[in-house]
Image (cartoon, coloured by chain):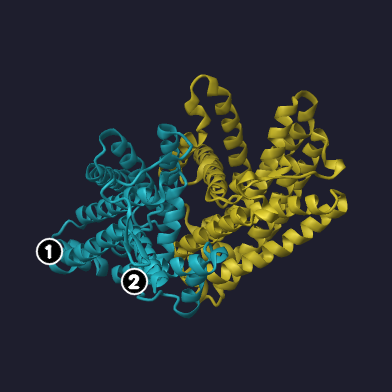
Chain colours: A yellow, B cyan
Amino acid sequence: MKTPAVIKLVTAGAKDRKQFVAGSAVALIAAAFLLMLPGFAGHATISLFSRIFILAVFGMSYDILRGFTGVINLGHAVFFGSGTYLAGILFLRLDPTPGTLLLAVIVTVVYCSAAAFIMGKIAFRGGGVIACAMITLALGEIVRHLAETWRDVTMGADGLTFPIPYMFRDRLLFYYYALLFLILMVIVLRRFVLSPTGRVLLAIRENEQRAIFLGYNTTTYKMISLQVGGISAGLSGVMFALLTRFANTELLTIQQTLNALLVTIVGGTGTLYGAIVGTAFVQLIQHYLLTLRDVHPVFTRWLLFFGSIYILVVLYMPAGIVGAYRQLADLLSSRNKKKIA
Amino acid sequence: MDVFVMLLVNGLAEGALIFLMAAGLSVILGLMGIVNFSHGTMFLWGGYVSVWMYTKTGSFSLSLLLAMVVGFLMGLIFERFFIRPVYGKVTAQILITLGLMIVFTELVRVLWGPTPLAAVRPPHLAGTWVMGSIIISKYRVFLIVIGIVVALGIHALITRTRIGMIIRAGVQSPEMVQALGIDIRRYFSLVFAGGAALAAVGGALYVPLVGSVWSGMGISNQVLAFIVVVIGGMGSFIGSAVGSIFLGLTGALVAWYFPPAAGVVSVLLMALVLAFRPTGLFGLAVKS
């Protein structure tokens, strides 16, 4: 049974507080575990977790668009891949120093902001989710194509190997940088989605027509959402450059975008944390599947399994893992209330 | 003059191929309000099964037929089991067709390996005609002829037959068609599978032109088809025909005179059209 809206509104405070306490407890336990993890885990695990932290930010940046604004951007890899490429090219052309990293961050932010502006101007013009998805897919493919043909700078399909600043070379230390990056981005993005602007984005997702009638210029808000999503994705791309020290055009493909889409769907869209859960889930299973490649070569094609999981999730569990958890929690709490009554 | 003829033939042949994909995409969008992101996957499968068949039997027409059948069956299965549960949910449709794209592209890599396979033109279509200084590839002329035949065929189907009448009525108002006692869902399946079969044939015809088949070709051609649909106006059949020719010709021109821009010209065209006519050249309102 659905709770009437008024009751929801009245009980929202108490429920929020309860959720907040539960959420903080989970976050604290998770943070403690992650801080101590390097103490007992091997190098491979540490690298895997650094990867999860960085890709989780990419997933969250996608969730800002998909989950909070209802925009399906199929060219999102442009931001991520460009971040990696820009950092790599700068490290290669200039010195791999912390100063260059700062420069790379600034250049990435400016670049992603400009790219988001152009992308939004074109994609939000046709109107509708469908047109936006088709146009962003086309734009993304074009950027990939450019990166592949502009061999002087990007090295084309061979990929770009580059040095990184000395202070980021230690895997253990980098683990903590990546964790810090994730925590900072969670704080920033959480503030953004809870801000008045974030609320308008939710309104657009729920019913764009109504948001327009309320007097909001929805296109402007979608542009803001794309800016935030794009820049966060670009920054995670820079971090990814520090992790892998390598960039190739794979990072710009639709597959890279779909990976972000996959983790947000599996984890739960419109939850922000869903992207983290989803990324961890997908990366850990992928890691496990790859260890099975000696059993049968089909396990190297892990996307086959993920694509199938993804389809099943869209069909049968549209709220994802976090969504399902929340539903379960709601169900349990309402049962408890019934018992008390 | 000779350059002009060559570019015309190249551009029209390219346009005919894009059209085979865009036509299905556009009619599906117009009738069902669905963008099929797995359309490129049908194209891909068409390419692979035709190469497989050609190396097994050496018959080009048989390989085209197999591509068509496989595309049609995939379309039927996709529509029945994956699209039908999410009718009316635009976002879920996009997501589910993307998921199908991932799985079936990956399946191609499992079945035929991740490296490109070579594809050859059948002997009677290989080679060129030489007229003075003009050299024309036979295969490209063949593509143009196929494109024209298919376009006229679909046009006749839509304007002259009872099925076409129901489809046109369905584009305007599916509820009304349903109320008149016609099971519109059967026509949805038919159109979806038909569009898939066209895309698969497009893939089968594309492969001999470029000489190889690889797992990334579905998505890159799907992008072109999307651009055509956006340029032509979403859901407009005429628009997709005109858009395909337009894109094919400009592509050929730019590739000849200014190769570095070949990759971006399609998107620039799309951006220009959207800037001045957001609904596309032959704009139809998209059902949402």
Q: Chain of mark 1?
A: B
- Residue B257 as seen in the image, left or right of residue A277: left
Q: Residue furthest bottom?
A: B276
Q: Is residue A75 visible?
A: no
Residue behind mark 1: B162
User: A154 or A79: which is nearer to us?
Assistant: A154
Residue behind mark 2: B242
Q: Chain of mark 2?
A: B
Report x, y in % for residue B133.
38, 67
For residue A40, which quarter of the picture? top right
- Residue drawn at 76 percent across, 29 percent down: A37
- Residue A32 as seen in the image, left or right of residue B207: right
Q: Is residue A264 above or below residue B159?
A: above
How packed mark 2 is, by other alpha carbons closer than 10 Å (few <14, some 14-19, many 20 or more), is many
Mark 1 or mark 2, whichever is nearer to me: 2
Mark 2: amino acid = Val
- Mark 1 lies on a secondary structure that is helix
User: B122 or A138: which is nearer to us?
Assistant: B122
Report x, y in % for residue A219.
56, 72
Report x, y in % for residue A152.
68, 55
Q: Residue furthest top?
A: A295
Compare marks 1 and 2 and give the one earlier in the sequence. Answer: 1
